Amino acid sequence: MISRDELQKYQRINSEKGVIDTVKSLATDVSQHPPLYYVMARFWVDWFGNSPAVTRSLSALISLLALPCFYWLCAELFETSLVGWLGISLLAISPFHVLYAQEARPYSLWTVTILLSSWALLRAIRLSHQTRALKSKISTWVIYAATLALGFYSFIFTGLVAIGHGLYVVVVEGCRWTKVVKAYGLASLAGIIAFSPWILVIIHNWANLESTTGWTTVNPPPFFLIKIWGLHLSCIFVDFGFALEHPFTYLVPPVVLVSVGYSIYLLCRHTSPRIWLFITILIGVTPLALMLPDLIWGGQRSGATRYLIPYLLGIQLAVAYLLAMQISGQMGAKQKLWQGIMIVLISVGVVSCAISSQAETWWNKVVGYYNPQIARSIDKSERPLVISNTSDINIGDVISLSYLLDAQVRFQLVVDPNIPQIPKGFSDVFLFYPSPSLQQGLEQKYKVKLAPVYQAGIVRLWKLPLKANQDIGIK
């Protein structure tokens, strides 16, 4: 039996544990998450406090670094400031990027490292061809190796970004063993060696890794992935939070797809292979690596938009180039038309961010999406008790729910297969995401039939009937 405040202490710094314990916990429980962001977050909350706002502010600050990084990448690719400024505008008001800039998760950091490593690679290739100074050449590739290592320690799918970089270098160099290919190989090897301690951690905890990522292999409903793939594309420009079955899901993504296709067409037609090849590889490698296994073996690896950040950044590069080309290369009515399109595109992004900022929850809150509605159901009771399991993701979900509940609510966490003895003094007893064994055990122990309280797809909140409460002497 614990209170709301007692439960929330598990999101606060434990003075008896340090950074090494943070790394050990990640290595043991969720080794698919490299430690860089979590170590930074550990220091951040230690310095500035444990409130959710303070914790999230780290990601918000990191996300601001993506703006100059995006500009540098555009400048390295297109050698014009207009594409860079338009790209910054699209990135700054992108509904997807704004959402994840508010998440206490590593995806803003991963966005920055993708942009940095991509910029460092293009710069290293350019200077390798332009300068004869060996020291300058080496320093550029050292910078690339360092940014690649930072990317690996930010998120494991940096490996897909590195594969795309390697493919780009080999093709641009004409599939020949040139000095640039050799330098790239050495820099990449250095980045991988720097990450090798965590690779060993992943291998050592492989069995646990399979259990914590098992959701990716669960087959989704028919046509679910097709809808999600469309929303992946549209959410970087417009996101009004409509449900999957809303007409938005069927109308807007195809329009965005045609527009993006036109952007890529013009990119390939009017730029050198050095430019369009880099962007198309950035767009193509990550989604193909996730979509093909889903199509061949089943699962929903490609259903998580956050895994496709390299693809989204590539799309934004192509669209920024399209707008810059049409605005600067046209005259008269056609130029005004494209200026109007740019204004509309920025406007829908701003409106999308405004709508999501006022919402209780959004689609990226996959697990706790229904917690506000559930909390309102529980808070109607005078003295409620909430029972839940400690298995799976319930602990994190219960902590999330606790921030939405009144102070008088009490929690009882149960370890399967135990069936709790319900204490006296509560007006209502709720079961939050109970396991089948807990649900069946309570029904058998107290000779009752649990009543569903809140259902969204599945029943997420159950209630022990009042008559049953009286029978077991709770009141």
Image: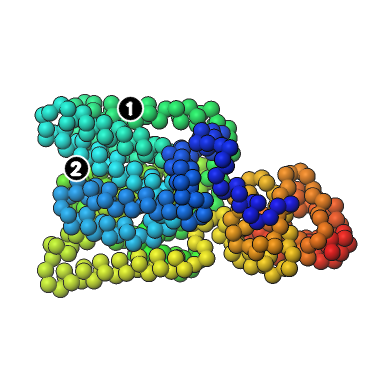
Q: Which of the pair 178/42 is nearer the observer?
A: 42
- At label 1, counting other C-alpha atoms closer than 10 Å, the crowd grade (few under 14, some 14-19, many 20 or more) is some
**Amino acid on which disc 1 is placed:** Leu
Identify whether 293 is placed above or below 386: above
Determine whether the residue tagged by mark 2 lies in a helix, strand or loop: helix
- Residue 189: give its label: 1
| Residue farthest along the bottom direction in this orientation | 333
Identify whether 273 is placed above or below 334: above
Find out whether the residues at labels 1 and 2 contact each other: C-beta distance under 8 Å. no
Percent x, y of residue 103:
46, 53
Q: Which of the pair 267/67 is nearer the observer?
A: 67
Determine whether the residue tagged by mark 1 lies in a helix, strand or loop: helix
Choose the circle earlier in sequence order: 1 or 2.
Answer: 1
Percent x, y of residue 152:
39, 36
In the image, what residue occupies the spot 46% across and 59% down? 227
Q: Which of the pair 470/231 is nearer the observer?
A: 470
**Amino acid on which disc 2 is placed:** Arg
Percent x, y of residue 282:
31, 45
In the image, what residue occupies the spot 40% across and 30% down? 195
Percent x, y of residue 100:
43, 54
- Residue 274: give its label: 2
In the image, what residue occupies the spot 36% across and 37% down? 150
